[in-house]
Image (spheres, coloured by chain):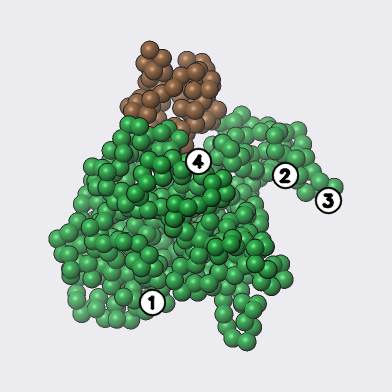
Amino acid sequence: MNTVLDFLEGSAAKYPDRQAYEDDKKLLTFTETRNLARRAGMALQEKIGAEKKPVVVYLDKSVECIVSFFGAVYSGNFYCPLDTEMPLERVKIIMQVLQPAAVITDLAHRNTAREFSGDALLLLYEELILTEASDAILGGIKEKITEQDPLYVLFTSGSTGVPKGVLLNHRVVVNYMEWLSETFDLSCEDVFGNQAPFYFDVSIHDIYGAAYFGAKTVIIPRYMFGFPAKLIGYLNEKRISTFLWVPSAMGIIARLKAFRAVRPEYLRHAMFAGEVFPRKQLDYWRENLPDVIYANLYGPTETYVCTAYVMTGEEEEGVPLPIGKPVSNTQALILDEEGRAVPAGETGELCIRGSCLALGYYNNPERTAASFVQNPQHCLYPDRIYHTGDLVRLDENGDLIYISRKDFQIKHMGYRIELGEIENAVRNVPGIEDCACTYRTDRQRIVLYYEGKEYPQNELLEAVGKRLPEYMIPGQIVYMEALPRNLNGKIDRAGLAGK
Amino acid sequence: METLLEILKDIKPGVNFEEEKHLATGGILRSFDILSLIAEIGEEMDVEIPVENVTPEHFESLESIMALIEQSRE
């Protein structure tokens, strides 16, 4: 299998009437998913051609999003999911970078989409799926799609205030699914429970897992993640057997000791990614559900999942859980500042090479060239590596251990956030002279310190909320007459802690 | 009620908790907010909320959360 279309076509041929994707309103079989996606693809290629151009999907999280993703690929283009709750200002910035050929939306979001679609064609999902698909045309397009072609672009927080569009190809997803299949006992009997938003790469596992394995993916309603007993009841009702969640989603079950009330009956694999899982919370899961297989998956958006650690049950207590070993066709290098491999056991920056690497940042060659660089260890032929910015070391079993970030990037509720992007948004508020953000890991809270004009908290949050998505909004705000500074004039971030 | 209001405002600044009637299903209180709220209620008000009662209908408004606290005290 070379592309995600092969996944869907394969499952639709093998399991035509099996349930494939379900949300709180709709349930689609593989045949229905394929047919709808082909119709959408047909319509798209008629409107914008098969030009390997980006197509924005601006819909609430639903099975329609998945149909649209496949539809964009059928049309010979690629997709970019945008959150319908994202502030318009941020959407507009992304649109400037992306310059998509089309925006797929629905009647409910058409008016909002009009405000940012600019030169892009605005297409209604309801209309796209009415187009009759032609085997000859779609077959001709599919033949020309290679595994190296772009599949999706996801925007992540950028330190300069402009989000970066990470562009990945089919190969990354095919490679991941093959590794998943070799590593875990997953089959068409499995039900994937989706938690991650579609603009967050963790969701790739759910979107394509169903199509690859002929399994089913259930989109779990977001509000359930605040109510552990209800969530577990839902897992049972939908017979969810496997999931890849951010640890915070699993952590709430542990922190409220929800297994006292109800236990997941069908769960076989619990995978997590996106942030460090506090050991106490993970231990609660393992003590209560010892037969479940637990796996810690790691990877920045630029490498999707590049390393993984499957728990053996013999992990030492009180030490961080490893991020494990590289997935198939991937190599992890631990390099010092000069690009030399560090001695075994010593800390260095994790750099990744292999099939999991993104193509680069969309419409940003400078940034791509700066982040995806020549492997300093093989200079005689082209060999790209990606600098993750994460400090790691190898343990005695050859597993990677995550130490910390090199810069000011944080993980909050599984989202990767550059504190610089929040600071830039705050600095744009009239009257604010300067600011700095820190992250309180104990309370999982972004703390904003600022100087200049003192704002009532509500007003400041409202102003910042126009530029930032909800998960980037500071949870605590501290006004200061003057921010503490070092001798060189830079804000003393260490001095802010405890203020 | 005042302590609860202070806790809520600390967890989620900028929300009009006296007026809002769909805090849970309207997506205003997110999963980690609920968790923080339960922890704070435990610490500040010395009330343990049983996990079975951590359901959306109990977290829709200031009044329903207060009723849950009272019920958990009994």
**Toward the viewer: A466 or A18?**
A18
- The amino acid type of the residue labelled 3 equals Asn
Q: CA distance from mark 2 to mark 1?
A: 44 Å
Residue at the spot x=26%, y=81% of the render? A140
Contact between labelled residues 4 and 3, with CB atoms less than 8 Å apart: no
How far apart marks 3 and 4 lie (CA) works out to: 41 Å
Instruction: Choose the circle earlier in sequence order: 2 or 1.
Output: 1
Assign the C terminus of chain A to one quadrant of the image: top right
Name the residue carrying label 1: A147
Looking at the rendered structure, the secondary structure element under dot 2 is: helix
Q: Quadrant of residue A29?
A: bottom left
For label 1, count other residues whose C-alpha is less than 10 Å away and answer few (under 14), some (14-19) or many (20+): some
Classify residue B4 as left or right of residue A344. Answer: left
Looking at the image, which residue sits at the far right? A487
Figure chain in brown? B
- The quarter in which the N terminus of chain A is drawn is bottom left
